[in-house]
Image (cartoon, helix red, strand yellow):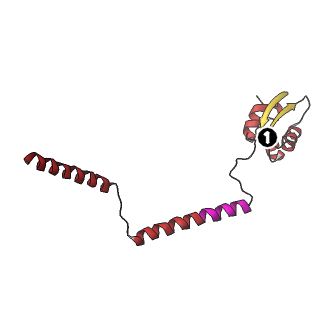
Amino acid sequence: MFAASLYLADEDQQTSASSNADSANTVTLTKEEHDSLNAQIKEWENRVIELSKSKEASGESNAPPATTRFILTIEPGMTSPEISQELEEFDIIEDASKLDEYLNNQELTENIQIGKYDVNSSLSIEEIADLITR
C-alpha cells in the first residue's frame, strides 16, 4: 500500500512538472489583447496591399533591370565621341556625353586601344574607360 501511494505521489509531481514546463512556453492573452493584435495584423496586411498597388501603378518592379551585353569594336581612327555614342545607342550607357567627358577630363582619349571589348550595361563609366584604355 505504501508503494502504491508513493507511486501516485510521484506521478502527480511529474504531471505538475510537465504542466509547468508547458506554461513557461505559453502566453495567455485577454480577448481584448487578442483582438488588438489581430487588428494590427490586418492593418499591416492592408498597408502591404496598398504599397503593392502603388508600386504597380507607378510601373516599378521588383525584378532587377535587364543587363545589356555588347561587343564593342574600336577601329583605327575612331574618336571618343563616336565610341561613346555607339555605347549609348546599344544601351550600354545612358548618356554618351558622360563617358566622353570622363575620357577627356582624365586625359585618356589618347590611350584608347583598338580591339574588341565585351561590355555590358552593369559597368560604370569608369570601368568602361579602364577597359578600353588599358
Q: Is the residue marked by circle 1 packed among few (<14), some (14-19), or many (20+) residues within 10 Å?
A: few
Identity of the residue drawn at 55% across and 64% down: 44
The x, y position of residue 7, in whole percent, is: 15, 47
Q: Principal SS element in the magenta part?
A: helix
Instruction: Tell me how many marks there are.
Output: 1
Identity of the residue drawn at 76% across and 32% down: 131
Residue labelled with disc 1? 68
Specify whether residue 120 is in view.
yes
Based on the picture, tell me whether residue 55 belongs to the magenta stretch.
Answer: yes
Highlighted magenta segment, given as a residue range: 47-60
Q: Residue furthest front?
A: 1
Left or right position of 41 against 82: left
Question: Element at badge 1?
Answer: loop
> From the viewer's perspective, is residue 133 above or below residue 32?
above
Nearest the camera: 126 or 73? 73
Identity of the residue drawn at 64% across and 63% down: 51
> From the viewer's perspective, is residue 64 above or below residue 79?
below
> From the viewer's perspective, is residue 83 above or below residue 16?
above
Nearest the camera: 97 or 61? 61
Identity of the residue drawn at 36% across and 60% down: 27
The x, y position of residue 3, in whole percent, is: 10, 45
Q: Residue furthest right?
A: 77
> From the viewer's perspective, is residue 45 above or below residue 129?
below
Left or right position of 54 against 97: left
Q: Residue furthest left?
A: 2
The x, y position of residue 19, in whole percent, is: 27, 54
Q: Quadrant of the C terminus?
A: top right
